[in-house]
């Protein structure tokens, strides 16, 4: 049993006040929806809670169930809702666009796609100026891998163990966790040691891990490779921030072997990490290709690949086409998202509130032995639960238990990591200090009762 020094002082945490009530809900109940889901939806779908939540409304950092009960959204639709649920500017941009034209394929001109491509390119470092729109992160990464292979003439791709890059054949190959890999052809992919400061063999020594990339090139390939793909902070893998110094050293080996460096910014991009707009920037590297999705449209289906004009030339006279990619509704939303991030200083907010939240979570670690590690940056934070700190034995059941109890108190967080024992805290970037306090108080209260 975990005991808390202040056990007697802890009161049941209360949600911060919020001035919004959703309209009454008259749709089917959670049980009816669950029954339909079980009958008509793919059995591969899973839900977060044993008693799944029926979310009916969303407003900024809050979700509402069918009874109008409010929940603080600490997961942000898996690091996706960056501006806040139904942010008025994003809704307005979509409504304005839908009243003019809903679909226009890239075979015609439409300003929404061009305006957003220009705005996105202005957020990129180096010569990353050419944008290709997709519908998801998976598609963006599939395209990035294909470009790297076409450009270099090699099939060999290196990705990190524990990575998640998507669920189509190519990206499933680059993904490196057994539960996300199926028995389909996934050739030419090599998985490098994960520069994981908490569980990795070299601790926080990024350059040591990067030697494995060179070893793979030397011993597993012809010496010439297509590319290297990695997240800056692994999301699905359990909020693992790559050890400092890793990316510069790995990129050096990759470039010397003729490969392209691909940054998967599907989770870490759009200011989420606080210190930088893109996650990779924290390690001072400039990739050859950047892929993105999730936060790009605040939840509207959209993804993108951004590369240099020189690399983009490989697609010249190749009919690579996507019916929905760059749909004007999505790109209008994307432009509104960029404007909101800037206008409301959301990156700065992620830094300030995220640092405060991390500090408070780290204090909890001093109080509860079950917390093995608190990590991440900005509003992309992870809390790993272990049954003993020495062996780092994953506390999987306890992780789910705490999440379920926190939900009862009115706060939603996610989980992930190879062992399913890491809380993923990736709220909308409009999260406030009061929200951070409530989240930590709810975790504290729950752990005090274990
Ligand atoms: N890359 C990363 C880092 C992700 O976290 C994900 C999804 O979680 C993907 C790619 C795939 O994106 P999507 O689910 O939009 O296909």
Image (cartoon, helix red, strand yellow):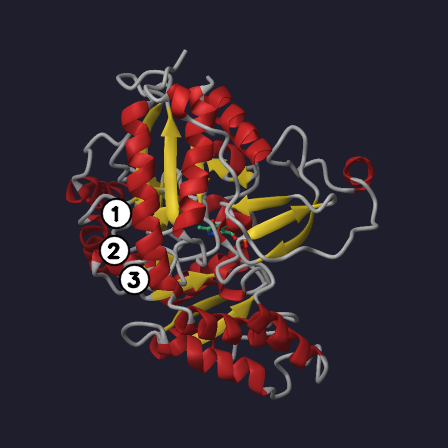
Find disc 3 in the rendering and name its residue. Answer: 276
Disc 3: CA contacts within 10 A as few (<14), some (14-19) or many (>=20): some
Asked which secondary structure carries label 1, the reply is helix
Q: Quadrant of residue 38?
A: top right
Q: Are marks 2 and 1 in contact (CB under 8 Å)?
A: yes
Q: Is residue 133 above or below residue 24?
A: below
Which residue appears at 37% of the width and 30% of the height? Answer: 384
Q: Nearer the viewer, residue 268 or 186?
A: 268
Q: Is residue 15 above or below residue 317?
A: above
* Quadrant (top left/top right/bottom left/bottom right) for the N terminus: top left
Between the residue at mark 3 and the residue at mark 2, the CA separation in whole angstroms equals 24 Å
Q: Between tags 2 and 1, which lies in front?
A: 2
Q: Is residue 211 visible?
A: yes
Q: Position of residue 193 (x, y in %)?
A: 29, 37
Which residue appears at 37% of the width and 68% of the height? Answer: 345
Q: How many marks?
A: 3
Decide if residue 11 is on the left or right side of residue 122: right
Q: Quadrant of residue 376?
A: top left
Asked which secondary structure carries label 2, the reply is helix
Find disc 2 in the rendering and name its residue. Answer: 254
Q: Nearer the viewer, residue 13 or 176?
A: 13
Q: Is residue 440 above or below residue 5?
A: below
Which residue appears at 43% of the width and 79% of the height? Answer: 119
């Amino acid at each position: 049993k975990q005991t808390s020094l202040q056990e007697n002082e802890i009161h049941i945490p209360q949600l911060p006040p919020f001035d919004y009530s959703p309209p009454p809900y008259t749709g089917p109940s959670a049980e009816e929806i669950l029954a339909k889901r079980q009958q008509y939806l793919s059995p591969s779908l899973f839900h977060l809670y044993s008693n799944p939540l029926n979310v009916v409304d969303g407003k900024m950092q809050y979700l509402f169930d069918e009874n109008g009960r409010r929940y603080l959204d600490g997961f942000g639709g898996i690091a996706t809702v960056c501006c806040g649920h139904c942010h008025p500017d994003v809704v307005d941009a979509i409504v304005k666009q839908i009243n003019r034209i809903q679909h226009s394929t890239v075979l015609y001109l439409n300003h929404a796609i061009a305006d957003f491509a220009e705005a996105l390119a202005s957020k990129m470092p180096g010569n990353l100026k050419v944008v290709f729109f997709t519908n998801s992160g998976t598609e963006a990464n599939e395209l990035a891998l294909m470009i790297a292979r076409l450009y270099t003439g090699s099939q060999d791709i290196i990705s990190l163990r524990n990575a998640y890059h998507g669920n189509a054949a190519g990206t499933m190959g680059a993904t490196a966790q057994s539960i996300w890999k199926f028995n389909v052809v996934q050739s030419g992919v090599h998985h490098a040691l994960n520069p994981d400061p908490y569980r990795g063999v070299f601790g926080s020594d990024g350059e040591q891990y990067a030697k494995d990339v060179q070893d793979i090139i030397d011993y597993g390939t012809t010496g010439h490779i297509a590319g290297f793909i990695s997240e800056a902070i692994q999301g699905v893998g359990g909020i693992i921030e790559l050890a400092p110094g890793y990316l510069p050293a790995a990129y050096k080996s990759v470039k010397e072997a003729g490969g392209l460096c691909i940054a998967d910014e599907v989770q870490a991009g759009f200011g989420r990490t606080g210190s930088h707009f893109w996650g990779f920037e924290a390690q001072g590297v400039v990739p050859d290709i950047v892929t993105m999705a999730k936060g790009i449209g605040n939840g509207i289906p959209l993804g993108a690949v951004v590369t240099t004009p020189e690399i983009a030339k490989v697609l010249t006279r190749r009919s690579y086409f996507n019916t929905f990619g760059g749909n004007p509704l999505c790109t209008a939303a994307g432009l509104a998202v960029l404007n909101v991030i800037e206008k409301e200083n959301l990156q700065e907010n992620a830094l300030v509130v995220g640092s405060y939240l991390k500090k408070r979570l780290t204090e909890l670690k001093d109080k509860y032995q079950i917390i093995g590690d608190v990590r991440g940056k900005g509003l992309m934070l992870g809390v790993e639960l272990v049954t003993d700190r020495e062996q780092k034995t994953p506390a999987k059941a306890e992780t789910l238990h705490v999440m379920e109890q926190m939900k009862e108190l009115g706060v939603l967080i996610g989980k992930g990591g190879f062992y399913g024992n890491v809380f993923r805290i990736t709220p909308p970037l409009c999260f406030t200090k009061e929200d951070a306090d409530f989240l930590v108080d709810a975790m504290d209260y729950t752990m005090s009762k274990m």
